[in-house]
Image (spheres, rainbow, N blue to C red):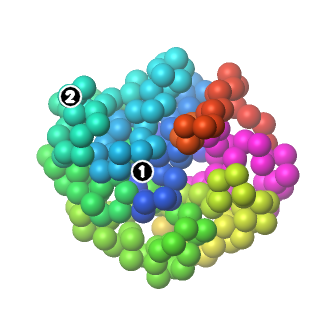
């Protein structure tokens, strides 16, 4: 099963869901498939682990990274580059918008309401059931509602990102899949794909999943660790 997302895709989620890591790796995955990809860093709330930190590796792969103006790169201010509205009006084959966490981060989407008019927008909620506030269906639905109200956009899909970073086990992946699959059934939202860290993939039987799997090559790491270099080809698994 392949991830075939195209068009304008907005990635949202609660703090700690891993949405930025997912966005970066989704961009790389689609680029490897020959898709023209742009990604915009719209996280102006959280000063850590933003898409901009992976700008170098992404740019080397030919992925355009759109950031706020230089003077606002490290400011927590709702200031958008005109390039962002422009990339929505003239999107690439895949235009990814990585949005800040929770409803606070999603408010920036409401300022793009005019640019979104008459365009098909996919809004995908990243869910990590191993994090506080999204360990229950009720918690996930509450986060979804708050994001939708702030963004003035409806979430229409789920990305499962069950992980405990370096402590993640195969059982965590299987249990996480069962959780997001159940959430999909209860909410009526499509389960687009789940994620598995590249180094854990050999221990995972992907035949147990009824959705695609995105391999995660971690880029957003603490200062004492090194990001994984992107492989030239998509990791097997």
The image shows residue 136, relative to residue 65, as above or below, that is below
Q: Are marks 2 and 1 in contact (CB under 8 Å)?
A: no
Q: Is residue 198 magenta?
A: yes
Residue at image location 48% in from the left, 22% down from the top: 56
**Residue 101 spot, x, y in % from top left:** 37, 57
**Residue to which mark 1 is pinned:** 11
Q: Is residue 49 left or right of residue 67?
A: right
* Residue 76 point in image, percent of width and height: 24, 46
Q: Nearer the viewer, residue 57 or 160?
A: 57
Q: Is residue 53 magenta?
A: no
Toward the bottom, the furthest residue is 138
The residue tagged 2 is 71
* Picture coordinates of residue 84, whole percent (x, y): 25, 34
Q: CA distance from mark 2 to mark 1?
A: 25 Å
The residue lying at 50 percent from left, 59 percent from top is: 17
Residue 25 horizontal/vertical position (percent): 56, 39
Which residue is nearer to you in this view: 71 or 136? 71
- Look at the image and give the residue range highlighted in magenta: 190-218
């Amino acid at each position: 099963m392949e991830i075939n997302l195209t068009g304008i895709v907005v990635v949202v989620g609660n703090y700690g869901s891993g949405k930025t890591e997912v966005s970066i790796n989704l961009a790389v995955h689609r680029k490897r498939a020959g898709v023209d990809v742009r990604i915009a860093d719209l996280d102006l709330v959280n000063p850590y682990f933003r898409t901009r930190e992976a700008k170098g590796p992404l740019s080397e792969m030919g992925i355009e990274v759109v950031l706020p103006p230089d003077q606002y790169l490290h400011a927590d201010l709702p200031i958008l580059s005109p390039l962002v509205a422009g990339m929505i009006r003239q999107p690439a084959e895949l235009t990814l918008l990585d949005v800040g966490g929770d409803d606070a981060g999603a408010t920036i989407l409401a300022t793009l309401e005019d640019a979104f008019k008459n365009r098909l927008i996919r809004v995908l909620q990243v869910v990590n059931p191993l994090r506080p506030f999204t360990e229950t269906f009720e918690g996930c639905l509450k986060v979804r509602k708050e994001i939708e109200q702030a963004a003035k956009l409806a979430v229409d899909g789920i990305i499962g990102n069950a992980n405990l970073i370096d402590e993640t086990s195969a059982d965590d992946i299987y249990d996480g899949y069962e959780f997001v699959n159940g959430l999909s059934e209860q909410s009526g939202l499509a389960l687009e794909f789940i994620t598995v860290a590249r180094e854990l993939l050999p221990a995972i039987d992907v035949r147990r999943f009824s959705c695609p799997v995105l391999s995660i090559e971690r880029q957003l790491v603490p200062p004492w660790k090194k990001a994984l270099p992107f492989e030239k080809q998509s990791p097997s698994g």
